[in-house]
Image: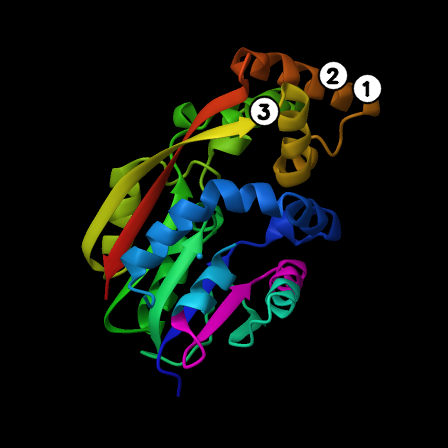
Amino acid sequence: MTAERRIEDQAGGTYGSVEAAEGWRRTGVARAQVLAPLTERMLDLAGVGTGEQTLAAARRVGPTGAVLATDIAAQMLALAAEAATQAGIRNVETRVLDARDLDLEPESFDAAISRLALMLLPERAQALAGVHRALKPDKKFVALVMATAEECPFIALPMGIAARRAGTPRTPFGDPGMFALGDPAVLAAAYRDAGFREVAVEAAPVQRQFPSLAVAVQRLRDSLPEIPQVLMHATDAERAAAWAEIEAALRQFDGTDGFVVPHTYLIGVGTK
């Protein structure tokens, strides 16, 4: 039995392909720069020890603790395991699990975190119940999710354009979906319905910055597989037209200081 254990869960599905995993790997450094302070805040709220998220947690719990990283997508877990090995971190275990069926020992974890996954999960209540069951009494679950579409234009504008061109304009804005938990009241209710107490939600506004519009659009191509998925039945010409419209819509954020776009996350926390 370890002194401190943590469970991490991410969504699979769209992100489970080799192509999506490779794009995720290419954008790892930039993503870590944006999310590092938010990840540290998540770990603070979760009470993990004394900063990408698995390695941050593993460093915090130290050699006497352990981290379990779970995902339905084996490709994503392979990246996490490779990163841990390269960093010389030996207290990380990876396990392919469906978040809706967390086959874990009850009351065996000291903390649980989920970064940018909870809003993508179908049957979310079942997943949250599993997290609640795996936590020890008085321990915390912390989740980072997207705020509303209006507060996340770098993601919402491209997804909306792609969906409209594909003839499915409402697809990116449903539940499950990127913005399904963007209302703080909805996120808090999901926690409470799963039995968590002392629930709190805080907004975390950031500035997404890139050297240029071209770099920003390439980052979207690498890290947002929802767009190719929505456009999978489009012709090459239709896909090219969609990306041209996306670039035009995002040009409003390109200026003398490079590409700068506001983006807001929500951090939810609840105690078992």
How was this image coloured? rainbow
Residue hosting label 3: 158
Residues at marks 1 and 3, CA–CA distance in whole angstroms: 17 Å
Residue hosting label 2: 241
- Where residue 237 is drawn, which disc sits there? 1
| Left or right of residue 68, residue 125 in this image | left
| Left or right of residue 54, residue 134 in this image | left
Residue 207: name its quadrant. top left
Q: Amino acid at mark 2?
A: Ala
Q: Amino acid at mark 1?
A: Ala
Decide which of tag 2 and tag 3 comes sooner along the chain.
3
Question: Residue 127, image x and y in percent?
Answer: 41, 61
Q: Amino acid at mark 3?
A: Pro
The quarter in which the N terminus is drawn is bottom left
Q: Residue at x 76, y 27 (%)?
A: 234
Q: Residue at x 31, y 78 (%)?
A: 107
| Left or right of residue 135, residue 153 in this image | right
Residues at marks 1 and 2, CA–CA distance in whole angstroms: 6 Å
User: Callout 3: few (<14), some (14-19), or many (20+) C-alpha neighbours within 10 Å?
Assistant: many
Q: Closest to the observer: 211 or 189?
A: 211
Decide which of tag 1 and tag 3 comes sooner along the chain.
3
